[in-house]
Every structure is written in C-alpha cells, then in structure tokens.
Amino acid sequence: MNNISLQNVNPVKAGLVVFIACIAVYLLTLCPTVYVGDSGEYTASARLLGVSHPPGYPVYSILGRLFSLLPFGSIAARVNFMSAVFGALTVLLLFFIVHRLTKAVLPAVCAGLLLGFSSAFWSQAVVAEVYTLNAFFTALTLLLLLLWEEGQDLRFLYLFAFVYGLSLTNHFIMMLFFPAYVYFILATLKSSGKNISIVTGKLPCIILLFM
C-alpha cells in the first residue's frame, strides 16, 4: 500500500481546509451576546463608531461597524463574528508563514491548528476583543517581510510599512516589534549586498519607518 505524502498536497488547499476548520468551530462556539470584560464597550464603540478606552482602537471600531451591519444575529454576535474571522485569517497566515519557512505542509498544518485551537486564542476568537485583529496584523507583517526577503520585491516592503502603520492604530503593543522589524530589514539588506542608502532613498516610507 502506497503511503500518502503530504508533500504532494496543494498548500493553498491545505491552508483553506485549516481556515474552514477554524472558522466553523469558532462559529459553533461563538458567544451569542455581550461577553464579560471589555466586550460590551467594544461592541458599543463598533456599532456607534465611538472611542473605546485608550488607545481607542479606531481600526477595530471601523471594522466592527462594518460587521455590525451584517444581516444575522444580534449586534453583539456580529461583532463577535469579526473576532472569529480575523482569528481564522491569522491561522491561515501562520500556515503560509510556516510553510514558507519549512517548505512542508504537515508542520504548517500543525502550527495553524495548534494556534487556532489553543485555549487562549480560541477564547478570544469567539468574543468581541481586539486580540485576534492584532494577531492578524502581526502575522501579516511577518509574512510580508518574508515575501520581501525572498524576492527583494520592494512592493512587499511598501505594503509591510503600510500594514505595520495601520496595525499601530489597533494596539500599541505592535510598537514592541519595531526594533525586531528594523533589524530584520537592515540584516536582509546587508546580506543581499545592497547599499542601504540607495534602497532607502527609493523608499520614503521606510525612511519614515526608521524615524
């Protein structure tokens, strides 16, 4: 009997299966109403386009407003659903990050499912909270940097700078990644043998990022 090798599995299809598995479970366990803690505040600010406690979470409120217009469930359930969507998207991005690093489907699937169904992450993916959106931004910035490192396509670096700037309007904790991101970019430029001043001269957004 021939063994089925996961190496022959299409990584895009495998990633979609992981995404669907997570979003399905999140929907089945989604909180149907307002949860404890900051959930009520986030739901209200999303529905009314208000300002939550500092730092305010403007991106979360704007996206939450869009989700609150969905034609199903209570307003609280719709905003809770946003956490589920970004939670599942984060798992999908992690799948592609690990697959890009390992060139293998199995560790990517395991990493995605371990994150998606870990108790801490799962608990935040079914209620109105800012953490799955923040995790989404974290995973997306990492993936964009890896894509840029691989092909040295400046468009990925531009997009990274935009996404990273946007992430700072969701949660201030993203500022903690700034030194690591700068180090990664400079180390990649140095290892590629490119003149840093020439590259940054073509990237005003990167110059602003370093300031």
Image (cartoon, rainbow, N blue to C red):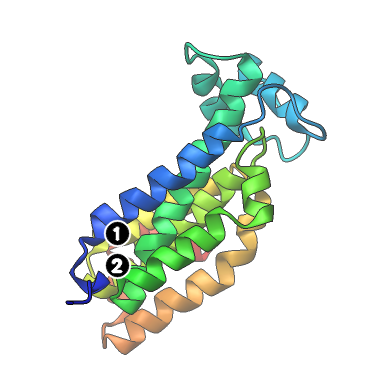
- Residue 118 falls left or right of residue 182: right
Residue that sits furthest to the front in the current view: 1
- Residue 199 falls left or right of residue 35: left
Q: Is residue 49 visible?
A: no
Q: Which residue is mark 1?
A: 156
Q: What percent of the width, then of the height, locates residue 120?
A: 69, 54
Q: Measuring 26% from the left and 70% from the top, which residue is drawn there?
A: 6
Residue that sits furthest to the top in the current view: 71
Give whichever of 108, 145 is nearer the camera: 108
Q: Say whether marks 2 and 1 touch (CB < 8 Å).
A: yes
How busy is the neighbourhood of tag 1: few (under 14 within 10 Å), some, or many (20 plus)?
A: some
Q: Secondary structure at mark 2?
A: helix
Q: Amino acid at mark 1?
A: Phe
| Labelled disc at residue 148 | 2
Give whichever of 169, 75 is nearer the camera: 75
Number of numbered callouts drawn = 2
Q: Amino acid at mark 2?
A: Trp
Give whichever of 192, 94 is nearer the camera: 94
How busy is the neighbourhood of tag 2: few (under 14 within 10 Å), some, or many (20 plus)?
A: many
